[in-house]
Image: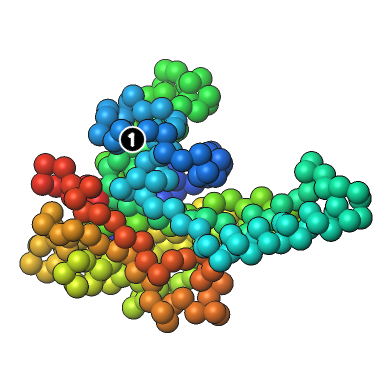
Amino acid sequence: SDLEYSTAANKHLEADMNLKTILIAGLFSFLFVGNISAQKVWEREANFWSADDALLILKDSPFAKTYMSSEAAAAAEKANVAREQSQSVFSGGSNPKSSERSAGIAPIVARLHSSLQVRQAIVRLRQLTPEYQKLSGGELQRFDEAQKTYIDCGICKNFYVISVTKFADSTPGRVDEGIFERTTLPEVKGNVWLLADNGDKLEVFQFTPSKGGAGSAYFFFKRFNDNGEPFLKPSMKWFRIVFSNDFLTSSNPYTPYLPRNFEFNIGKITFDNHIEF
C-alpha cells in the first residue's frame, strides 16, 4: 500500500542523510581527477574497495552519471576571468588567494540506487571513516546490522530507485538549496519517466524531494507490471530517466542543473542475466 511504501521509503532514505557531507565533499574533489583505473572495480569484493573505488562507483560508472551544464560552466569561467582582470587593473595584479572564483551551476549525479553496487559503495565509505574505526563491541554490531538492512533494501525489491544529488555549493554568501527541494509529486507525475530502448515508458510512482544542500532526491518506479513482468529486461540495450520539456521550463529553478535525460547501458549492469538495478 502507499502507507507501507511511505514508511519503508522514509526509513531507508534517512540512512543516507548522515553520509551526505562526506560523500559530496569526496565527489566534488574527485570529479576533476578522472577515472582512477580502467578496471571494473564494482566487480571486486566490496570489502576490498578503497575510498576512491567507492567514489568512482558513485560518480562515474555504469551505475552513476555526473552532469554539469556546459553553458553554466562557460558562464562561470567568463565571470571568473572578468573578476580577475578587474582585480589586476585595480591592484596591479591578480591575487589567487583573495580571488573568490564562481563555481557556476553545480554538477549533479544520477545514481541507480536500487543497484546493489551503489548501496555497497555508500556503506563502504561509511566503513572507511575514522568514526567507524573507533567502534567496538555492541556499537560495532549495531552499526553493521543497520548497514546490512540498508544493503538489503526491502523497498528495492518492488521498485527501481534513482537518486539525484547536487554537489555542494561553496560559493560565499549563497544559500545552497538541494536539487528538487521544492518539487512536489504532482509536478513530477507525467513529467519524469523511465524510457526503454523499445519505446516503452514507465511513469514515476512516488517521489521524495531533497532535504536541502547536498541531500538527494529519490524517484521510485514500479518494477513489475500487473502480470508480474519486470519493465527492464536483459535483452534491452539501454534505458533513460527522462525529464519532459514541460518540466524543463524557465520557471523551474532546477532546469539549469539538468540534462534532458540520463542514459544507462543495460549490458554493463547485467550480471549472469540479472539486471543489477
Mark 1 highlights which residue?
A: 38
- Could you say whether the residue bearing mark 1 is in a helix, strand or loop? loop
Report the residue that reaches farthest toward the top.
Answer: 137
Q: Is residue 191 left or right of residue 96?
A: left
Residue 12 at x, y = what percent?
A: 37, 48
Query: Which color scheme did the rendering employ for the protein?
Result: rainbow
Q: Relative to the observer, which residue lies in front, 200 or 79?
A: 79
Q: Relative to the observer, which residue lies in front, 18 or 162?
A: 162
Total marks placed: 1
Report the residue that reaches farthest toward the left.
Answer: 227
Relative vertical location of residue 211 with respect to residue 18 in this rendering, above or below: below
Q: Is residue 45 left or right of residue 171?
A: left
Residue 9 at x, y = what percent?
A: 36, 55
- Tell me if I can see residue 123 in this picture: no
Q: Is residue 218 left or right of residue 62?
A: right
Q: Relative to the observer, which residue lies in front, 35 or 218?
A: 35
Which corner quadrant of the image does residue 48 belong to? top left
**Which residue shows up at 36% across the image and 61% down it?**
262
Which corner quadrant of the image does residue 46 belong to? top left
Q: Relative to the observer, which residue lies in front, 174 or 38?
A: 38
Which quadrant would the N terminus be assigned to in this image? bottom left
**Which residue shows up at 54% across the image and 68% down it?**
256
Which corner quadrant of the image does residue 118 belong to? top left
- Label 1, residues with CA under 10 Å away: few <14, some 14-19, many ≥20: few
Residue 105 at x, y = what percent?
A: 59, 61
Residue 274 at x, y = what percent?
A: 14, 47
Relative vertical location of residue 106 with respect to residue 41 in this rendering, above or below: below
- Tell me if I can see residue 67 in this picture: yes
Q: Amino acid at mark 1?
A: Ala
**Which residue shows up at 58% across the image and 51% down it?**
168
**Which residue shows up at 35% across the image and 57% down it?**
162
Relative vertical location of residue 55 with respect to residue 239 in this rendering, above or below: above
